Amino acid sequence: MSRPEIVFACSTGTKNLLRLSAWAEDQRLVASGAFDRCVRLWDVASGECLRVLAGHRSYVRSVDFSQSRERLLSGSGDGVVRLWELATGKMLQEFQGHQDGVYHAVFDASQTRVLSGGRDRTIRLWEISTGRCLRLIDATGAHVQCLAWHSDQRRFLSCAGDIRLWDSETGECLQVFEGTGTRFDPSPGVTISAIFYRPPMTALCGFGNRRRVAALKC
């Protein structure tokens, strides 16, 4: 078994258990979130922690780099999404409205809007400049585990028990993916924990009592 070349070492203790991480597109930086309620920014080459972003009141479940690599989103169990300036560590914006923990928050390509979803079974579309919620979508009674923008930047995908394609302008559900077998299996106990849009298809990773990767066209 191969071993990692770089180890990013958080301080010891169960409260600092790593929750997730995200790569910047240039692969020079990694951001991580943990149960100590902090976001950490790491240098990939050296493994050095460059900055600690503190302010959330619960564990950090989601981190996402902007395409410019100048800003970072974090979503937390406190129900708040925060926007950070990486160069200074300053918090630029708070997006408040979720009634429970945020599981995923992502920038759109224009870096003017944010999608978030979580334990309160809603998806919210936010305007970055004002922090205003532009749209509230009921995610059909399931926790929203992950979100991904379509390449047209109008539609997006959600994983919340099933996989759905939405119109961000209207809030309309355009398609529900209900395949079985090798394509997609929403069986009890299978949790889809990651979704990535890569034209011309969407790659899905499912974890639970079955492990598989499926691909859907949309």
Image (cartoon, rainbow, N blue to C red):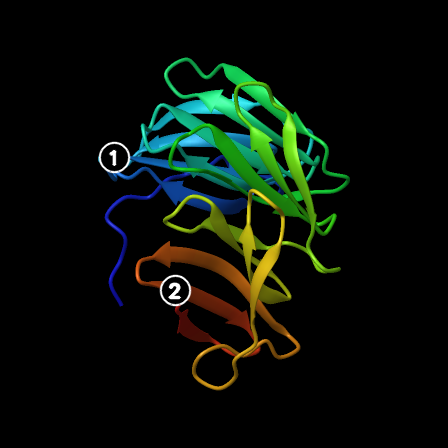
Residue 56 picture location, percent across and down? 64, 28
Picture coordinates of residue 115 (x, y %)? 55, 40
In the image, what residue occupies the spot 57% across and 27% down?
Answer: 82
Residue 67 numbered mark, or none: none
Q: Amino acid at mark 1?
A: Arg
As shown in the figure, which amino acid type bears the numbered disc 2? Ala
Element marked by disc 2: strand
Question: What residue lies at 59% left-to-right and 76% top-to-bottom?
Answer: 186
Classed neighbour count for the residue bearing mark 1: other residues with Cα under 10 Å, few (<14), some (14–19), many (≥20): few
Q: Is residue 93 visible?
A: yes
Q: Secondary structure at mark 1?
A: loop
The quadrant the N terminus occupies is bottom left
Residue of label 2: 203
Quick one: quadrant of the C terminus?
bottom left
In the picture shown, does residue 112 fall above or below 172?
above
130 up-or-down from 211: above or below = above
Residue 99, located in which quarter of the rendered image?
A: top right
Residue 28 bears which disc, if any?
A: 1
